[in-house]
């Protein structure tokens, strides 16, 4: 495939579609590195909240990129995110941070300013990148592109279990409302809206568990 970068697997989809766990499994199986691009938007949102930068202030958010000091360290399972040298794992996964990230992510100049950082995660032997625009904008030449779907109800249930397992409190009706609002914002924005790349394989995951989705994706990759 001369036109394609053989070493990038792009996994996109709405929140709670199971991208993160799938990306983790696929990266482990292939021995690839990972980019959790949602975590980058979440870290920038946290930074803005810490410094009192308004989430509608595009120029103020872009200025933050000059002092945006983040890193990920290998953890037991998922990578541990650091902001300004501080482990912010628990703040990062909270719904309020996801919501703030979705607001930060509406701004075209912020997205533009984060492109280089996201692409710098690419390292041999390869990268599994998950997010909203991995296959459409950040890695348009990715060799494999997947787009995960699941109904908002199923996604709310999954998020609920995830939060409870992390020892955080959660309310399923509230989660469903938040997911609907976030979908609308992520799909409706003009800058890199959430949508499948033309050459993405769309996977409906509502009726599949993680092991089945992992198997489907890996067999697609290995079959090529
Ligand atoms: O995947 P996540 O829930 O951690 O992402 C948080 C928010 O960040 C999401 O609502 C939209 C935004 N985001 C984005 O716009 N583009 C990405 N590639 C990843 C996340």
Image (cartoon, rainbow, N blue to C red):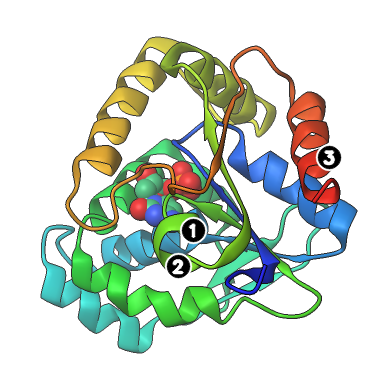
Which residue is denoted by mark 2 in the rendering? Answer: 138
Helix, strand or loop at mark 1: helix
| Number of marks in the rendered image | 3
Which residue is denoted by mark 1 in the rendering? Answer: 134
Residues under labels 3 and 1: Cα distance?
21 Å
Mark 1: is the Cβ under 8 angstroms from ligand 1?
Answer: yes
Tell me residue 211's x, y (percent). Answer: 82, 28
Which mark sits nearer the N-terminus, 3 or 2? 2
Q: Are marks 2 and 1 in contact (CB under 8 Å)?
A: yes
Which numbered mark, 3 or 2, is in the foreground of this view?
3
Residue at horizontal 22%, vertical 83%? Answer: 63
Mark 2: is the Cβ under 8 angstroms from ligand 1?
Answer: yes
Quarter the N terminus occupies = bottom right
Which residue is denoted by mark 3 in the rendering? Answer: 219
In this view, 39 is above or below 153: below
Tell me residue 6's x, y (percent). Answer: 71, 69
């Amino acid at each position: 495939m001369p036109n394609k970068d053989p070493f990038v697997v792009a996994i996109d989809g709405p929140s709670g579609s199971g991208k993160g766990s799938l990306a983790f499994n696929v990266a482990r199986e292939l021995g690839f590195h990972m980019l959790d691009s949602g975590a980058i938007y979440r870290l920038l949102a946290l930074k803005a909240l810490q410094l009192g930068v308004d989430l509608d202030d595009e120029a103020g958010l872009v200025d933050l990129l000059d002092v945006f000091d983040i890193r990920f360290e290998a953890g037991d399972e998922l990578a541990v995110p650091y902001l300004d040298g501080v482990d912010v794992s628990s703040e990062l996964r909270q719904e309020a941070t996801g919501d703030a990230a979705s607001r930060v992510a509406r701004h075209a100049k912020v997205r533009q300013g984060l492109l280089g950082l996201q692409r710098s995660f690419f390292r041999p032997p390869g990268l599994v990148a998950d997010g909203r625009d991995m296959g459409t904008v950040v890695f348009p030449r990715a060799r494999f592109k997947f787009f995960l779907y699941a109904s908002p109800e199923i996604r709310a249930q999954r998020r609920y279990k995830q939060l409870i397992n992390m020892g955080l409190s959660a309310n399923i009706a509230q989660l469903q409302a938040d997911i609907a609002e976030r979908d609308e914002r992520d799909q409706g924005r003009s800058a890199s809206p959430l949508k499948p790349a033309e050459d993405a394989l769309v996977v409906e995951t509502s009726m599949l568990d993680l092991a089945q989705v992992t198997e489907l994706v890996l067999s697609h990759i290995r079959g090529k």
